[in-house]
Image: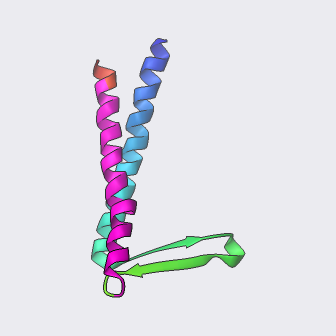
C-alpha cells in the first residue's frame, strides 16, 4: 500500500507536467505564428489541417483554448493534486 501511495501521486505529477509543457508549447507557438496545424490519418493518406488567426479567428481561439489552455490548466491541477497527495 505504501508503494501505491507513492506511485499514484508521482504519476499525477509526471503526466501533469507533460500536459503543462504541451499546453504551453501550443499556446506560445500558436500566438507567435498566428496559426496552428496538425496532421491526422495514416502516413500515406495523411491530411493536414491549419487554422489561421487571420482567416478563422473563432476557430483559432477555440483550438488555442482546447489544445493549449485546457491541457495547461488541467496539467497544473494534476501537478498540484499529486504534490498535495505526497505531502498529506
Looking at the rendering, which quadrant does residue 68 occupy?
bottom left
Identify the residue shown where x is 55% and y is 78%.
Answer: 48
Give the extent of the magenta segment: 55-84
Residue visible at 35% across and 87% down in the picture: 55
| Main secondary structure of the magenta stretch | helix
Quadrant of the rendered image containing residue 11: top left
The answer to whether residue 56 of the structure is visible from this angle is yes
- Where's the C terminus, which quadrant? top left
In the rendered structure, the answer to whether residue 14 lies left or right of residue 41 reads left
On screen, residue 71 above or below 51: above
Q: Position of residue 6 (x, y in %)?
A: 42, 21
Name of the residue lying farthest toward the front: 58
Residue 17 in the image: x percent, y percent?
37, 44
In the foreground, 74 or 86 = 74
Task: Out of 62 and 33, give the one closest to the viewer.
Answer: 62
Query: How many labels were placed on the picture?
Result: 0
Amino acid at each position: 500500500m505504501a508503494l501505491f501511495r507513492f506511485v499514484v501521486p508521482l504519476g499525477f505529477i509526471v503526466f501533469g507536467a507533460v500536459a503543462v509543457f504541451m499546453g504551453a508549447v501550443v499556446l506560445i507557438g500558436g500566438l507567435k505564428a498566428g496559426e496552428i496545424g496538425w496532421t491526422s490519418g495514416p502516413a500515406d493518406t495523411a491530411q493536414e489541417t491549419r487554422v489561421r488567426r487571420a482567416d478563422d479567428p473563432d476557430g483559432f481561439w477555440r483550438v488555442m483554448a482546447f489544445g493549449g489552455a485546457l491541457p495547461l490548466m488541467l496539467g497544473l491541477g494534476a501537478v498540484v493534486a499529486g504534490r498535495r497527495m505526497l505531502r498529506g
